[in-house]
Amino acid sequence: IENKPLTRMADLPINVVNQKHLDLTKSGVPDLEKKLMEVVAKASKMKGVIVASGRGEENFVMANITPSKKKDKTLVFAEPNPVILYYNSGIEHIKSAIEIRNNILKSELGHEELYAIFCDFYKESFQGITQMIMAMESLFNQKIPENIELELDGETLTKERIEWKDFKTKLRHIVPQLTGIDFYADHNTDYQNITEVNNLRNNLIHLKSLKEDNYTHYQALCKALIDFDYEKNCTSIHKAITLLM
């Protein structure tokens, strides 16, 4: 997914009365870019001031950060969208996991060599699967309006209470009310695939030791990672994020 910043100026609930455009590139001012950044940094700290940067034909809201360990320095940059960062990072790990799995399945590896390679596979799978669900849940929470009161099973939910609901409840019941997109009813195959990713993510995050007859503890989880259909399930996550964004 294209790594665009989070908030477009055009999407803000503000009424633009007039605009003035100044081309400073031909001003001949020494150290122009440095001085402009100093002005932007000061302006961005003023109450009520919104600072944006242009990317192509769009302008995006900028963040303003003063590092605790270097308080004389101001970092000003277009605010990233964590949803896209999590998704793109997750996809890179998934691609790596698939490549390692293919190597495991087609190669004749000794147990020592297989141990090291499988550890790499586990790490890549874990990162990819957890970041896929992080991306989706972050997007769910982005869709919650500030002053919402939503009814669910006789309970009135505020924004804060919705944010603490579990992933499956959000996907099945809350997202349709917030967006009008009902994955369970209208995209059920994708719904099932996404919940399958979430179930595996839960098994990875909330490890349960299940001692087998051969005294292994996570053998079933290792098999689940090897057998998992990464392409199919991640395609459904990509579709869901695209629909919701």
Image (cartoon, rainbow, N blue to C red):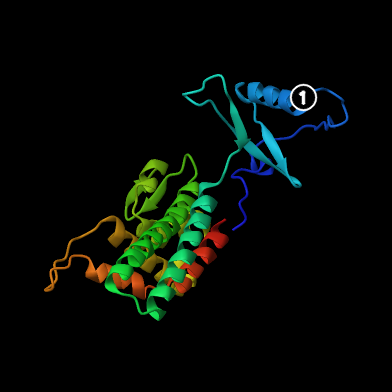
Report the side of 53 relative to 233 (left or right): right
Q: Position of residue 25 (x, y in %)?
A: 84, 32
Residue at 36 percent across and 79 percent down: it is 108
Residue holding disc 1 = 31
* Residue 8 lies in quadrant: top right
Q: Nearer the viewer, residue 17 or 30?
A: 30
Specify whether 158 is left or right of 15: left
Q: Is residue 182 visible?
A: no
Q: Nearer the viewer, residue 157 or 201?
A: 201
Which residue is found at the position 57% from the left and 23% from the top?
73
- Residue beneath the point at 77% across and 24% down: 31
* Disc 1 crowd, CA 10 A, few/some/many (<14, 14-19, 20+): few
114 and 130: which is toward the camera: 114
Occupied quadrant, residue 208: bottom left
Where residue 185 appears, x then y in whole percent?
45, 70
Q: Amino acid at mark 1?
A: Asp
Mark 1 lies on a secondary structure that is loop
Q: Relative to residue 16, is residue 163 depicted above or below?
A: below
In the rendered image, the quadrant that contains the N terminus is bottom right
Asked if 93 appears above or below 9 in the picture, the reply is below
Q: Is residue 47 above or below residue 123?
A: above
